Amino acid sequence: MRELNEYTESTSEYELFSHIYDRILGKEITTFSALKEYMAPILKDKRTHPVVMRGFELIKCLNWGFFSGISKETHRKIWRELVIPDQHFPDAGNLKRTISISNLYVAMLDIHGYTKFCQDSRKNLSMLHTLDKTINNEIRKISTQCSAVSQRERGDEIVLVSASATDAITAALSIIDYFAMTNVVNDPAISTQRTGDAEILPVFKISAGIAGGNTSIPLIVTEAGNLSGFLLNTAARLQARANELSPKESRVMITKQVYINYAKENSVTKSPICRSNAVYFFDTGLIEFKGVMLPTCEVVFKKEERYKEKFSEEMNKLYTSIRESLWEQKVYLDLMDVIAKTAAVMPQFKVVPKKPINGIALFTNDSVMQLCRIAIKAYLQDEDYPYAVELLREFIAIMEEIPGFDRLILDYTGGIAEKYEMLLKNYEAAIDKQVDEKITTIFTGNHLKTYYAAKNGVAIYEKMRTIARKSPGIAKKKVLWYTLIKQNKDRMTLTIYSGKK
């Protein structure tokens, strides 16, 4: 059968399919609507309908790329969002190529330690094949059970698409459960327990980013069936941010819109992870990705990290102070509240600094809170702004040594320190001018002689100048500090970046 008009009642189904197969394989037919149009003259014959559906499956396999494995039966939600159904063949249709809808979510997952595992297993090909088979088969199975579709990208990356925020979060956590051998989701309908050869694989940690649920962020499906567009890029950047915050542990970052939609979905019918209170959504503020500001949240799913709930209020106050540019007092004081509350509620720790800080040689939860009180006194009562800013750097050094101290707080402490340090040069120059003008009232007798003599010895001179700067004879230090903040308002905007600027 070379031409369709050669079709007769005696033509076998196999012969007809072979004819259609050649047209589809040769890219003459790439969509279901084109297939129907081509076969229109013979569609009245019911015997052709099974061939039409077989042709549709072939079109899916060759042209739907990422979505080639979905069907109306296995991925009902995604099918409804991605496929333009056919009136006469309800189980077939055309794949949308530009999708800008509210019920679409993309997750990007990265397997920590994948490269090292491949290097360590280069002489054990069976281990490599086992991991490869696991990613390609078991993870796809888990995704389907979560009403999502997934595909492996570039070795250690997995892209996942779902039609609800709940499905996206559940799928990401289920994949984490599988690789980390945990049981966060705890849903018997989802196969997160390893079986067979996969049991010998080591534990892997996962970083994940989830975006979606916003009609202004499109997803594009290319002619080859690959994913493209800002939604995919956003998920990838959130995954990168999760990796920055937890390079050795699993972490899931989402946009605020994903959380809002999750809350709406579960206000009607609660999902298993909602019923079991398996997750907590921690507001992580605004993150800038290549000029775009994104409100973000962390999906907290580890029991040992649920203490973050207890300082979320303090973090939100800090976000507000930064957003409203309250740098005169509120930003500094709110940051101290965050650090102190975190130290109060997190697991007990002991850290020995490289050198004693304000006489403290061993830092525990209590001594970190004590240092916060010292910093507040320096900033608020003593008006010793250089020392208060110096203490921010000391806090960073301490927090970097504390096991499990949240990296987000480190990022904000570093960003705030940079903004205040920017003011110090002008502040100290103005103070030094007053010191020179009032030196005879600040120092008297031998101290005054020492001050003048110290100009010939830089180290002693700087020490004396530091003492002079703190003198009560220097008036209106607070006014000067606040004035500098106001004069530099345009430079005091704090943005937490992720990825390349």
Image (cartoon, rainbow, N blue to C red):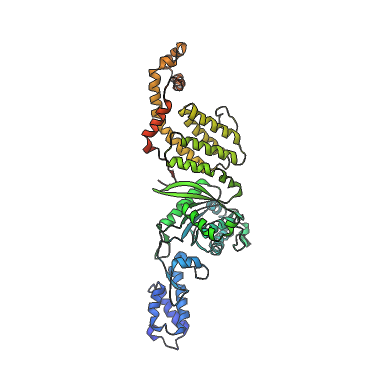
Q: Is residue 178 visible in the rendered structure shown here?
A: no
Residue 57 percent location from the top left of the image: 47, 73
Q: Is residue 285 visible in the rendered structure shown here?
A: yes
Outermost residue toward the top in this view: 445
Residue 222 percent location from the top left of the image: 40, 63
Q: Which residue is at 44% across, 66% downward?
A: 82
**Number of numbered callouts drawn:** 0
Q: Which residue is at 62% across, 39% downward?
A: 348
Q: Nearer the viewer, residue 229 or 137?
A: 229
In this view, 65 is above or below 343? below
Residue 103 percent location from the top left of the image: 46, 61
In this view, 230 is above or below 493? below
Q: Nearer the viewer, residue 289 or 165?
A: 165
Q: Quadrant of the N terminus?
A: bottom left
Outermost residue toward the front in this view: 268
Q: Nearer the viewer, residue 372 or 10?
A: 372
Left or right of 38 in this view: 192: right
Q: Which residue is at 41% across, 77% downward?
A: 22
Q: Nearer the viewer, residue 432 or 134?
A: 432
Residue 90 percent location from the top left of the image: 46, 75
